[in-house]
Image (tube, rainbow, N blue to C red):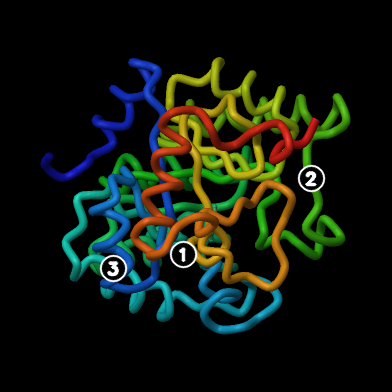
Amino acid sequence: MGKITISTLEKQKAAGEKFVCITAYDATFARVISEAGAEAILVGDSLGMVLQGHDSTIPVAIEHMAYHTECVCRAQPQSLVIADMPFMTYPTAQQAMDNATRLMQAGAQMVKMEGGTWLSDTISMLVERGIPVCAHLGLTPQSVHTFGGFKVQGRSPKEAKSILADAVEIQDAGASLLVLECVPAPLATDISRKLDIPVIGIGAGPGTDAQVLVLHDLLGLSAHTARFVHNFMDGQSTIQGGIRAFVEAVKVGQYPREEHSYS
Ligand code: KIV
């Protein structure tokens, strides 16, 4: 199989084939994740929590993201590499352009930004200039202090309507992918059906086109995990086995189950 591109993921959505994304921050795990068959690798700003030991992603800097993106890309994974734009690196379209350029030059194939309608112009500007964008809605961790904690989003009809409207607008602005985090499963299913672009869920139930988990969570290494996390090392004797178990569980529809979802 050759390098995965956005066209591969679009075809998988059209065919109803689930795909998998896992976070990675270094070359070894990028290779292992790619060999396990995950279609996408996210160099997530979750590295601020799982590598750097912070209690949020807010302290992460663009230099950290560029460094870890380079480490991941040196493994030459087949998986599509998406790199996160950290906190306050995209408050204006020009700042987004400058910082996204650094991640693309570090080897990323796409950048990810948290936000909805307010990001439309930025998304259009980046896409028009050749930088593909993955948007991120629902529980956007960089806004943890606005939400008053890591809380499920979209539970009220008003919030759900606003997340759906944001999703449609970022698609119209040119986003190629959407990550939906910690929203009720029926809302995520509805959004995935309404959008043409692939939707990657995390804590968003089984109805999205793909699933993403933080590597350390799926390997059972995190001290505190959310309801949607499953330890895929259960019954496995190797890390490679645990990662393969996650990939297979998503593809055959065994993960996530109802107990991993919010209603
Ligand atoms: O930074 C990250 O790892 C993420 C995922 C949780 C989607 O954004």
Amino acid marked by disc 2: Val
N-terminal of the two: label 2 or label 3?
Answer: 3
- Please give the name of the residue rendered at 26% of the width and 72% of the height, measured from the top-left corner: 27
Q: Looking at the figure, which quarter contains the N terminus?
A: top left
Q: Residues within 10 Å of mark 2 (few under 14, many from 20)?
A: some
Instruction: Please give left or right for residue 17 compared with residue 7 in the image.
Output: right
N-terminal of the two: label 1 or label 2?
Answer: 1
- Front residue of this view, candidates 162 and 23: 23
- Front residue of this view, candidates 101 and 54: 54
- Front residue of this view, candidates 91 and 49: 49
Determine whether the residue tagged by mark 2 lies in a helix, strand or loop: loop
Amino acid marked by disc 3: Val
Percent x, y for residue 91? Answer: 58, 61
N-terminal of the two: label 3 or label 1?
Answer: 3
- Please give the name of the residue rendered at 33% of the width and 73% of the height, measured from the top-left corner: 26
Instruction: Please give left or right for residue 7 compared with residue 258 in the image.
Output: left
* Mark number displayed over residue 95: 1
Look at mark 3 in the image and give the residue it sits on. Answer: 72
